[in-house]
Image (tube, helix red, strand yellow):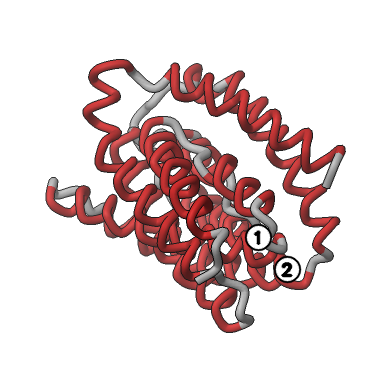
Amino acid sequence: MDPALFWQLPLLFLAGIAAGLLNVLAGGGSLLTLPLLIFMGLPSSIANGTNRVAIFFQCLFAIRGFRKRGYFPLELILLCTPPALFGSWLGAGLAISMDDLLFKRVLGIIMIGVLVLSILDPMKRMTQDAARLGTWHKVVLFISFFFVGVYGGFVQAGVGFIIIFALLFHGLDLLRINAVKVFVVFLYTAVALGVFVYHGQVNYSLGIGLAAGNSIGGMMAPRIAVAKGHDWIKKVVNVAVFIFAMKLLVFP
């Protein structure tokens, strides 16, 4: 066993808990875990693939929770999933073929962009009207989720914000949005993870340690949300994301 695992696994486990909490309560947990994997010395492509292991299991637990409560928006899932699957395959292929240094630069820029979006939180100012799912809206959603899949397959970090924004724009309530989000992310993550596995771009030891933390964080999230809310978590993670982004951009 690599001696470094003795400190890497506990650190990833704790980071996974924080990411799981954030993904359930606010979104953007991969902004914390993906750069951490890179800073542990993994090439960016392997870090990207390893992070998908945690996302896969976290979504699996979330799906189970939604199904137990009777939320399974089948029509929306069937509409949004196929283009996302194809887009994810393309995005994962792009991520694997990209130069390591260039990927770090791109990730740093993405992190700053998502951080600004998280702070401004324009979704708070959007109203939830009656769902608008006419033919034109379905076409727009279909095309939108192709690009969601490309982005999610490429980097994953912050994709939850994009999905929520896309579905809020069509008047969907947050409950159905989150149900659609976890189903779509689970399925396209399976495709992206398959691409990374095929190319040998996954560190399974670190991925399982991170997945354990993500799963526990997701299960803890509802209780913590009631006790303290999620704003305090967002503030702490926003600071960490800013530091990580500067490190990737200035000292890659």
Camera-side residue: 205 or 148? 205
Location of mark 1 (residue):
154
Instruction: Tell me the quarter of the picture where residue 20 sits.
Output: top left
Q: Pinpoint residue 248: horizontal percent, then vertical percent.
A: 78, 43
Location of mark 2 (residue):
94
Task: Residue at 60%, 20% (x, y): give it.
Answer: 119
What residue occupies the far bottom of the structure in this picture?
Answer: 198
Question: Above or below — where is 202 with respect to 141?
Answer: below
In the image, taking residue 46 as reference, residue 52 lies left or right, namely left
Task: Residue at 13%, 46% (x, y): give it.
Answer: 69
Camera-side residue: 152 or 238? 238
Q: Earlier in the sequence, mark 2 or mark 1?
A: 2
Q: Specify the amino acid type for callout 2.
A: Leu
Task: Residue at 73%, 68% (x, y): give it.
Answer: 94
What residue occupies the far front of the structure in this picture?
Answer: 3
In the image, taking residue 11 as reference, residue 87 lies left or right, namely right
Label 2: few (<14), some or many (≥20) within 10 Å?
A: some
Q: Pinpoint residue 92: horizontal percent, then vertical percent.
A: 64, 68
- Badges 2 and 1: C-beta atoms under 8 Å apart? yes
Q: Specify the amino acid type for callout 1.
A: Phe
